[in-house]
Each structure stands twice: as structure tokens, then as C-alpha cells.
């Protein structure tokens, strides 16, 4: 059985610098997406490994609802309560709160990145892109997600919820990938608002203040690490010299 060697002061400081770098990168990404429609901020927290002394950074997605802004665009839709739109990507279905939709060349409803917006068929293999009729002038989206063109119902938006306790990973274009399958919401429990968009839930001032604090802590840890190196240098070169 091996002998466990306690971490030195230098080891602890190096780990602290690594933790702070991860926090800073997360905060920087949040700030970069402060104007991204439907973006959900990432939050970092620190936990200890099995040795009880080594900290590691975990990242979780903050799913709190962002502010909703009226746009007047009929293809802009926001969810004012729980739920996520479902889109098809090359990697499979993903969730999003970004309802900045448009039509592609085929008339299909797509998100800002061109991913197909899906209808609410029960099974994944049955869900289809929502295609609007050519030349439709009056597009309406009801509170339950029902899409109509010139008074004729076309489809209903797939709107899902994420089970409690599920981990949620960020992907490109503001997409979310839960660790377990999402669950279709009943039409009566949906709150879709047409002509509006949900903004990012990043609080820019708060994120900036946190970044400044992390920078200060990083500088302090660097100075401490330099001091430890200096002491180690003295121990190696000076202690033990004959007087």
C-alpha cells in the first residue's frame, strides 16, 4: 500500500491558480454572451477531492429566466415561464430558450443558427420541422405554442422541461443538452409569448465585479507562490553551508 504524500504549499498554490483560471474563463464566457438571446450563464463552485485537501472546480448551468423584451416580430417567441424549445442539430435534439426564429429557403422554421425548430409529436422519431406555407402573411403563435398561418393551424411547437436534478451542458449557439431525456410539457402549462424575446440571464455588472475579485485573488496567489519559491531557493542554496 502506497504512502500518501501531503500536498506542499507550492502544490496548494498551483491548484488555487488553476481553480481561479477556470472561474475567470467561465465569467469571461458569460460576459461575452451578455447580449445573446436566451443564453444561460454558467456558475462555478468548488468541491474537494477524496483526499480532503485538493479543490476542484465544477461548472453548472444557471437556468433562471432572463428578462423578456417585446420586439413585435411575429417569428420572435419567448417562454415566460418554464420550458424549452426543441431544435434538431447534427448531434441530435437540443433545447433552447432562444426563440429568435426565421424561415429558411424551404419555408421551415429555424433558430438563429439555422437549426430546425420541431413540432410536439410525442416520439423523437415522429417530430418534424415546422414548415410555414409559402406566401403566408399572418403568422400567429398561441400561448400553448400552436402556430397558425393565415388562420390555418400548421403545427404546435415542441416545448419540453428538464427533470429536476438533471445536469445541463452548454453547447455552441446557446443550446442546452440535459443529462437525461427532456419531458414534453402539457399544452395547458405552457406560456408562449409572440413578438418577444428572452434576453440572456447574465448580470453584466455582477459578472464584472466577480472577474475583478478573481483577478485580485490570482495576483495574491502568484505573489505567494513567488515567495514560496524564494524560500525554497534559500533552503537549497544557503542552509547547510559551512560557517
Image (tube, rainbow, N blue to C red):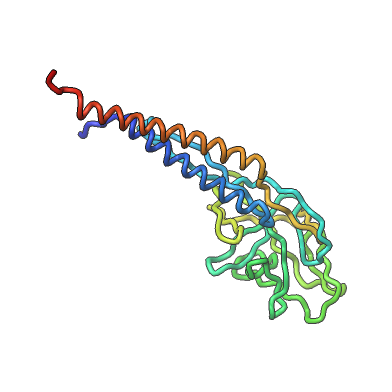
Residue 140: % across, % down = 83, 67
Q: Residue at x 31, y 30 (%)?
A: 230
From the viewer's perspective, is 69 left or right of 204? right
- Image quarter of the N terminus: top left
Q: Is residue 83 visible?
A: yes
Q: Farthest residue toward the left?
A: 242
Q: In this orientation, which residue lies closer to the viewer: 52 or 240?
A: 240
Q: Is residue 7 visible?
A: no
Q: Residue at x 13, y 18 (%)?
A: 243
Residue 124: % across, % down = 60, 66
> In the displayed structure, would residue 28 be above or below residue 212?
below
Q: Residue at x 82, y 78 (%)?
A: 136
Numbered-mark total: 0
> In the displayed structure, would residue 143 be above or below residue 223?
below
Residue 47: % across, % down = 46, 35
Q: Farthest residue toward the front?
A: 243
> In the displayed structure, would residue 234 be above or below residue 55?
above
From the viewer's perspective, is 15 left or right of 83? left
From the viewer's perspective, is 89 left or right of 67? left
> In the displayed structure, would residue 124 be above or below residue 11?
below
Q: In this orientation, which residue lies closer to the viewer: 2 or 210?
A: 210
Q: In this orientation, which residue lies closer to the viewer: 222 or 192?
A: 222
Rendered image quadrant of residue 15: top left
Residue 131: % across, % down = 72, 75
Rendered image quadrant of residue 77: bottom right
Amino acid at each position: 500500500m502506497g504512502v500518501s504524500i501531503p500536498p506542499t504549499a507550492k502544490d496548494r498554490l498551483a491548484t488555487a491558480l488553476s481553480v481561479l483560471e477556470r472561474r475567470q474563463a467561465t465569467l469571461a464566457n458569460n460576459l461575452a454572451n451578455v447580449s445573446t438571446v436566451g443564453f444561460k450563464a454558467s456558475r462555478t463552485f468548488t468541491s474537494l477531492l477524496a483526499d480532503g485537501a485538493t479543490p476542484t472546480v465544477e461548472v453548472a448551468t444557471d437556468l433562471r429566466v432572463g428578462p423578456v423584451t417585446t420586439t413585435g416580430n411575429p417569428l420572435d417567441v419567448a417562454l415566460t415561464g418554464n420550458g424549452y424549445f426543441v431544435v434538431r442539430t447534427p448531434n441530435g435534439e437540443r433545447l433552447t430558450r432562444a426563440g429568435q426564429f426565421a424561415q429558411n429557403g424551404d419555408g421551415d422554421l429555424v433558430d438563429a443558427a439555422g437549426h430546425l425548430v420541431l413540432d410536439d409529436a410525442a416520439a423523437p422519431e415522429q417530430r418534424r420541422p415546422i414548415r410555414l406555407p409559402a406566401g403566408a402573411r399572418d403568422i400567429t403563435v398561441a400561448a400553448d405554442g400552436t402556430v397558425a398561418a393565415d388562420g390555418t393551424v400548421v403545427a404546435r411547437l415542441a416545448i419540453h422541461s428538464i427533470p429536476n436534478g438533471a445536469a445541463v451542458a452548454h453547447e455552441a449557439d446557446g443550446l442546452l443538452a440535459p443529462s437525461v431525456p427532456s419531458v414534453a410539457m402539457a399544452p395547458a402549462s405552457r406560456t408562449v409569448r409572440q413578438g418577444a424575446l428572452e434576453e440572456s440571464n447574465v448580470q453584466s455588472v455582477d459578472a464584472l465585479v466577480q472577474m475583478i475579485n478573481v483577478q485580485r485573488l490570482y495576483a495574491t496567489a502568484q505573489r505567494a507562490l513567488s515567495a514560496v519559491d524564494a524560500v525554497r531557493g534559500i533552503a537549497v542554496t544557503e542552509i547547510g553551508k559551512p560557517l
